[in-house]
């Protein structure tokens, strides 16, 4: 799976990039035909949850997206990955019924 990382309006640390990539790599445990994954981190305008993470996952015949806001980028990435996992399971079930 090809992974791209984008940090908008801030400079991401190496540890944050590594954490994000490692977390997204675990998605291959749920579905092994993932083509590409984009990780986008950016500050949010919300005062309660100032960090936002968006994950765009490309699988055959479909693009799955998830976005999450949290107090830290790590938590936002974690929440977005949890959302993508649910979507991947649903997609995989649909594909296996065809």
Image (spheres, rainbow, N blue to C red):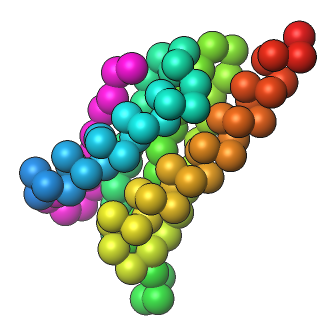
How far from the left and from the top, in percent, is residue 44?
A: 41, 72
Measured from the top left, where is residue 54 in percent x and y? 47, 51
Residue sitting at the far right: 97
What is the total number of numbered labels drawn onto the structure image? Answer: 0
- Quadrant (top left, top right, bottom left, bottom right) of the C terminus: top right
Along the viewing direction, whichever of 36 and 91 lies nearer the viewer: 91
* In the image, farthest residue toward the bottom: 47
Q: Is residue 8 magenta?
A: yes
Q: From the top left corner, tell me how far across and down residue 31 is, in percent.
A: 58, 25
Residue in the image at 74% along x and 29% along y: 91
From the top left corner, tell me how far across and down residue 26 is, in percent. 42, 38
Check the picture and name the quadrant holding the N terminus. top left
Looking at the image, which is closer to me, 85 or 48? 85
Considering only vertical position in the picture, is 24 above or below 4? below
Q: Residue at x 10, y 51 (%)?
A: 14
Residues drawn in magenta: 1-12
């Amino acid at each position: 799976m090809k992974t791209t990382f984008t940090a908008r309006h801030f400079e991401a640390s190496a540890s944050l990039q590594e954490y994000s990539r490692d977390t997204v790599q675990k998605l291959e445990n749920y579905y092994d035909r993932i083509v590409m994954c984009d990780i986008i981190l950016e500050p949010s305008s919300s005062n309660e949850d100032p960090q936002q993470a968006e994950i765009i996952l490309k699988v055959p015949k479909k693009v799955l997206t998830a976005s999450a806001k949290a107090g830290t980028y790590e938590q936002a990435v974690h929440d977005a990955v949890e959302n993508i996992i649910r979507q991947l399971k649903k997609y995989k079930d649909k594909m296996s019924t065809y």
